[in-house]
Amino acid sequence: MVKNKGFRAWYYFRNGWSMYFAFLFAATNTLVVTYYLAIEKAPILKELFPSFLHYLLIIVAIGIPLLVLVGYVHYKKTSAFSNEVAVNFESNPFQRRVLINTEINLQINIKLLELISKLNENKLSENNSMETEKLLKEFQKFISERKFENAKDLEYLKDLYKK
């Protein structure tokens, strides 16, 4: 793999700036500007927020839970995030390759399991033969039912986690 340190540094810089520094600067700027240009000039608002510290504490107490809720809705309750991921897969050849390779490996493993079962029909113990057949049927059923639009993969992952 060709590593261009300049572009990698630029990428890390942009991510560090946009995820951390720009966020902190924007939040600080918004709080300072709204307080000193809007609240200090309005007597009614000045009664609600007698000092910048009061304003900061109230905004943080309301804003953080609200923004956590908005983030949760973005990831879990709307199709926005799944569409972002779809765009990334469409445009990132490395992610596409991993997905396709995984699907190919899954098909190969099922075919190998079928062949091993056939080769060992009379050689495996009844218990091993039944386990292999059960596993094969379970995987085939799972693969036929799962789609990107449903939550079968997530359910399977949760079941594995419980075990």
Image (cartoon, rainbow, N blue to C red):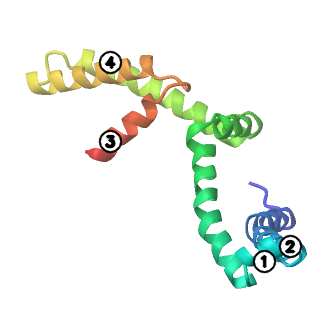
Task: State the quadrant of the N terminus.
Answer: bottom right
Residue type at numbered disc 1: Lys
Can residue 156 be seen from the camera position used here? yes
Disc 3 target residue: 160
Indicate which disc, 2 or 4, sits on the residue closer to the N terminus: 2
What kind of element bears circle 3?
Answer: helix
- What is the spatial separation of the Cα atoms under label 3 and label 1, in whole angstroms? 55 Å
Residue placed at 86% from the left, 73% from the top?
A: 42
Residue placed at 36% from the left, 18% from the top?
A: 141
- What is the spatial separation of the Cα atoms under label 4 and label 1, in whole angstroms? 75 Å
Placement of 52 over or under 86, stated as above or below: below
Disc 2 target residue: 42
Indicate which disc, 4 or 3, sits on the residue closer to the N terminus: 4
From the image, state whether disc 4 or disc 3 is nearer to you.
3
Residue placed at 57% from the left, 61% from the top?
A: 65
Mark number, residue 46: 1
Residue type at numbered disc 4: Glu
What kind of element bears circle 4?
Answer: helix
Q: Are marks 1 and 2 in contact (CB under 8 Å)?
A: yes
Residue type at numbered disc 2: Ala
- What is the spatial separation of the Cα atoms under label 1 and label 2, in whole angstroms? 6 Å
From the image, state whether disc 4 or disc 1 is nearer to you.
1
On the image, the x and y values in percent for residue 88 come to 72, 40
Mark number, residue 34: none
- What is the spatial separation of the Cα atoms under label 2 and label 3, in whole angstroms? 58 Å
Disc 4 target residue: 114
From the image, state whether disc 2 or disc 3 is nearer to you.
2
